Image: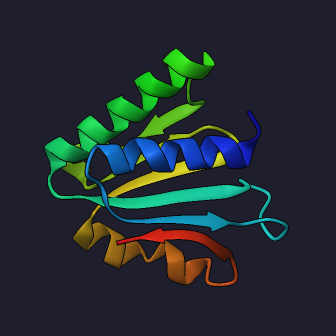
Amino acid sequence: MDSLELARYIVDLVEDKKAKNIVLLDLRPDAIIADFFVICNGNSDRQLQALAEHVRESVKERLQKLPFAIEGTGESGWVLLDYGDVIVHLFLEGKRLYYDLEGLWRGAHVLLSIQ
């Protein structure tokens, strides 16, 4: 599975768990940190933790792949899962607005946007 397929698979996973405002950004060729960002909102810190666990467990089970790092907790309002070429950002709405990753990476191509 290439990085785009992984990113789309993760989009499906978070959509299944009722994440909101899902965006898939293609950062190529401008970024060296990753090829894709998956960004979405959860409604509560509990949902953020559930989303993070669902992504981690599902990717591990299907692809035998673990994230290089997991940063943050649901309580912090931002959980990041780093799969190398794909970075997953799970936010509470206020934190997402504050950090404005879509604005910081406004030159990136939006491959998918699900409200």
Is residue 34 found left or right of 39 in the rendered image?
A: right
- Image coords of residue 102 (percent x, y): 52, 77
- Image coords of residue 104 (percent x, y): 57, 79
Is any atom of residue 85 visible in this view? no
- Image coords of residue 78 (percent x, y): 33, 54
The foreground one among 12 and 7 is 12
When asked about the image quadrant of residue 25, the answer is bottom right
On the rendered image, what quadrant is the C terminus found in?
A: bottom left
Is residue 77 found left or right of 82 in the rendered image?
A: left
Compared with 49, 56 (above or below) is above
Figure disc tally:
0
Compared with 18, 105 (above or below) is below
Is any atom of residue 89 visible in this view? yes
The foreground one among 79 and 63 is 63
Compared with 29, 19 (above or below) is above
Is residue 90 found left or right of 43 in the rendered image?
A: right
* Point 31% across, 40% down: residue: 51
Is residue 66 found left or right of 74 in the rendered image?
A: right
* Point 52% across, 27% down: residue: 59
* Point 34% across, 30% down: residue: 53
* Point 17% across, 48% down: residue: 45
Here the colouring is rainbow
Compared with 114, 57 (above or below) is above
On the rendered image, what quadrant is the N terminus found in?
A: top right
